[in-house]
Amino acid sequence: METLNKQQIEEQSQTAEEQRLQLEQLLEEKKAVRWYVMRAYKCEAKAESLLSNIPGLEFYMPKREVLRTYHGKKQVVKVPVIASLFFVHGRRLDIQPVKESYPFIQYAMTGRGDDRKFMTVPDKQMEDFIRVAESDGAKRFLMPDDIDLTKGTRVRIASGALIGLTGTFIRVKGNRKRTVVVMLDNLLGVSVEISSDIIERI
């Protein structure tokens, strides 16, 4: 029977410790509360119904108003800004059981192979986005290619209904007035017309 030498024992011990640390990190990540970017192809309404009623989870789907005709009558209805896209704030430990029961609910991922990662949005960025998207002001949803934010100025709104919100002060094509834009990284943005009198540079 082969006897392990001291170096081999140390290497095995080191490998076991690395595996233990990796498992601990994985568990901590699953426990972390984040805004996860998710999709449900052609099943947005069902995903909203399922995930909106789970304690500890917050569901948000950006929607816009459109005019539709039903049975000859025109009605204003809300539809997803991007089909199938929504966000869930919570722990993966709480989201995963729903995802496993309803396979049409999927995490949005970045990267390929071993580099694949869950797409998430920073809390402050998401909170500001929701505040603008749900505000009463004149707003507009934007795709990343619609605007070059490097031409704008980073600002904070100092007063009014959106006090504390941070974004980019810039002129958006099609808008006469300047707007503050909150952009979710490489996903979706929303702009709202704002007076320069109530903003401050950051």
Image: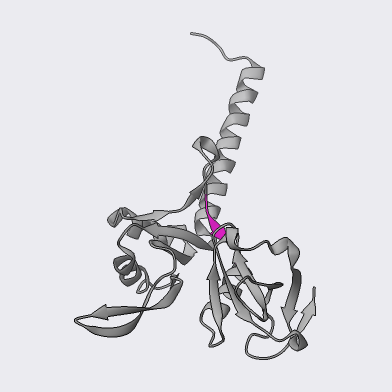
Q: Residue at x 56, y 86 (%)?
A: 137
Vertical placement of residue 143 versus 157, above or below: above
Residue 49 position within the rendered picture, expressed as x and y whole percent measured from the top left = 31, 72
- Residue 168 versus residue 16 in the image, above or below: below
Q: Residue at x 46, y 71 (%)?
A: 62
Q: Give the residues drawn in magenta, as a range.
A: 118-122
- Give percent across and percent down for residue 36: 49, 60
Q: Main secondary structure of the magenta part?
A: strand
Task: Residue at the far right: name it.
Answer: 201
Residue at coordinates 46% horizontally, 65% vertically from top-left? Answer: 87
The reply to whether residue 42 is in sight is yes
Can residue 130 be seen at all in this image of the molecule? no
Name the outermost residue toward the bottom: 160
Q: Position of residue 186 (x, y in %)?
A: 58, 57
- Examine the structure image and report whether residue 25 is included in the region drawn in magenta: no
Q: Residue at 48% across / 62% down in the picture?
A: 91
18 relative position to 95: left or right: right
Q: Quadrant of residue 59?
A: bottom left
Residue in the foreground of this view, choosing between 83 and 3:
83
Q: Position of residue 136 (x, y in %)?
A: 53, 88
Looking at the rendered image, the quarter that the C terminus falls into is: bottom right
Q: Residue furthest top?
A: 1
Is residue 167 or residue 30 the one in the foreground?
A: 167
Q: Is residue 166 left or right of residue 51?
A: right
Between residue 35 and residue 147, name the one nearer to us. 147
Q: Which corner quadrant of the image does residue 164 belong to? A: bottom right
Camera-nearest residue between 159 and 181: 181
